[in-house]
Amino acid sequence: MPAARPASFSVVWWIAARYLLGGRSRLLTGTARSALGSTGLGVAAMVVSMALMSGYTSSVENRLLQSGPLVVTPLGEAAGDLTSADETAGRLRRLPGVERVGATLAGQGALASRGNPAGVDVWFRGVLPGASSFGAGEEQLEGSADGFEAIVLGRQLQRTLGAADGDLLRLTAIVGSPSGQPRFAYRTLRVTGAFETGFSEYDRSYAVLHRDAVEALGALGVVLEVATSQGADQSAVHRSIEELVGADALVTDWRRGNRDIFAALRLQKWGLFLVLGLIVLVSTFNIAAALVVMVRERGRDTAVLAALGLGPRRLRRVFLVCGLSLGAAGTGLGLLLGSLVSLIITRYELVRFDPGVAEIYFISSVPFDVRALDLLAVAGFSLVVVGLACWWPARLASSLEPARALHWE
């Protein structure tokens, strides 16, 4: 008895293969070919869309991590203490994976220029040369020969101000006071360069000065910027810093600061998955139609098999195997085609943005990242809907009465 199940299972597969590949109906040259092609195209469209969203999300995330360091913001009494911040920076430099730590003074104010006298709201950072944020070079932070302090602007901010290198700007900074009331401090600064992170939010509203220049303005917030080593695990470094500073500081990075962007991208990715899944869903009707044709054309053969003792359950399995075989073949073809298209698009950078559009989307070209988990999700979805579509034709075949079928044949 235990050997009966494998034998009956092999019989089901043998009959299904004969139905698909043999006989006068030549199913694979007609309806089944259409079902195979439509399923393959639908699956390929899903693979390409998943690769697009995965590649874009990964590129933006990597750009965030490359463009901005981990940010440690002291809390409590140490919030404005630059000496304490420098001591903490010394301890952070000894952590594995940490390449550079800079104690930065952060502030807010407005910049006015000859080209834009109304002024623009800005966030500014005061850093020491060699530990600068946003890629500002050491030579750019040195003061000019005529005594004016240097300022390095975000590229979009420079365009908004209409300022060229060497122009003078007027900074109005909002700083604290011993009484707790905010006050204004003013400085005239000379533009010595510009930086570009690729993120519009930072390139249009951030500026970098020498830390001594910002410290002279008055009491401002202290921020520690931690740059990780090449290839270091950002999450592991993040955890190490949190263990070191404890509850005395808040540890964030640009990726966490822009979590809403990634939440929206994930939602968009799975929204595309469901929308393009409708293509696969429609293609399953072709597979169901192919099985209905098979049931009608193979009615006599099915009746003979039933008369010889092949029960309704095994007859149902025969047609389910036929349908699922078509669906699996179409799914495999679609996975291969979608992966190949994604590889070609990535290899030759066929999806590129103009510089103006690239500032909005953060990257100049989109890589199509084919991930195993995405392929499994697409394949699983396709096979499930194919199986559901095949159920009714298979049930129709199993309910066929041998005597009536042979009589009409």
Image (cartoon, rainbow, N blue to C red):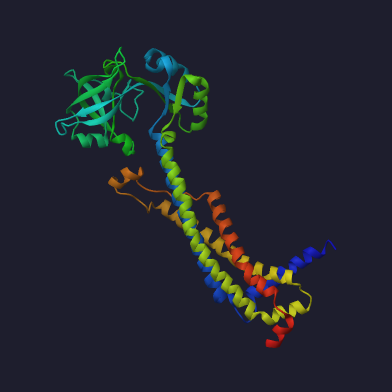
Q: Hey, which quadrant is residue 393 in on the image?
A: bottom right
Residue lying at 52% horizontally and 30% vertically, measured from the top left? 236
Q: Is residue 336 left or right of residue 64?
A: right
**Whole-percent x and y of residue 280?**
52, 63
Count of marks placed on residues:
0
**Whole-percent x and y of residue 275?**
47, 58
- Work out whether 374 lies above or below 68: below
Toward the right, the furthest residue is: 1
Can you say which quadrant of the picture contains the C terminus?
A: bottom right
- Work out whether 65 lies above or below 11: above
**Whole-percent x and y of residue 277?**
50, 59
Residue 49 vs residue 233, the one in the foreground: 49
Q: Is residue 94 visible?
A: no
Q: Is residue 269 left or right of residue 106?
A: right
Toward the left, the furthest residue is: 114
- Work out whether 120 lies above or below 247: below
- Work out whether 242 lies above or below 290: above
Can you say which quadrant of the picture contains the N terminus?
A: bottom right
Residue 223 vs residue 93, the one in the foreground: 223
Q: Is residue 375 visible?
A: yes
**Whole-percent x and y of residue 353?**
32, 49
Residue lying at 53% horizontally and 22% vertically, measured from the top left? 243
Residue lying at 29% horizontally and 49% vertically, measured from the top left? 354
Residue lying at 34% horizontally and 38% vertically, measured from the top left? 199
